[in-house]
Image (cartoon, rainbow, N blue to C red):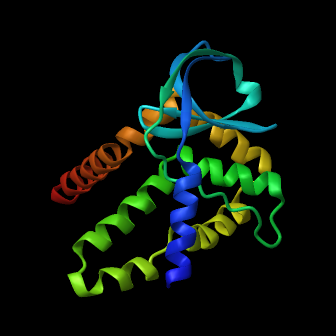
Amino acid sequence: MRKIIFVLMAVLMISKGFAFAETVHLKDGTTVEAKVLQKDSYYTILEINGRPMRYFNDQIVDIKEDAPAAAAPQAPIVKITSLSGISPTKLELITRFLQVNGTRASIDKRIEEAIANAPENEKARVKSVFVAEEMLNRIIPVYDQYYTEDEIRQLVEFYSSPTGQKSIEINTALVRDVVRATLSYFQEKLKQ
């Protein structure tokens, strides 16, 4: 247990640091103020409104550095690097999709709620039982089974767009209202 705590503390200390405020121009015409958290040969991870967002590098026209800004300590972005039978490219796309469509944030939120609602003497046990990465290791193969790499890429592009983000925001209300409308229709028809 002490070894785990030491490793977690080391990771948190390494992940601290400075990020730079940037003006990011995207190919879709959008301009955002963000902090560049990470950049590699395929993706750039930006912090926008406190949320990490990954963009394919070919979605970005340019990034103009503003002044350095002290970054708040960031939770390390955990990256699942391999799952049996899934290509690294497809794995990265599915991971990105789960980030942009809100699934990852939802899992993290549910785990936090479970820990917060657990009795004090059970919090440590609940925390050790519910591990986001383990859940993702189970979820990712399901997406791999139903979507091709190109379809996942298209989903990532859609959910990264303003329309995709709106669909995420309104989905719960939309489903609720569609169910109400459908029930109302059947109730009216059954009365005839």
Q: Quadrant of residue 29?
A: top right
Residue 151, given in percent of the width and then of the height, sits at: 73, 46
Residue 53, given in percent of the width and then of the height, sits at: 56, 38
Mark count: 0
Q: Tell me the quadrant of the picture where the C terminus can be found.
A: bottom left
Determine the residue positioned at 65% across, 64% down. 140
Q: Nearer the viewer, residue 81 or 174?
A: 81
Residue 75, given in percent of the width and then of the height, sits at: 49, 52
Image vertical order of residue 5 relative to residue 155, above or below: below
Residue 21, given in percent of the width and then of the height, sits at: 53, 22
Specify whether 191 is left or right of 153: left
Q: Quadrant of residue 85?
A: bottom right
Determine the residue positioned at 43% across, 61% down. 108
Q: Nearer the viewer, residue 13 or 177?
A: 13
Determine the residue positioned at 37% across, 39% down. 169
Specify whether 61 is left or right of 32: right
Image vertical order of residue 8 relative to residue 166, above or below: below
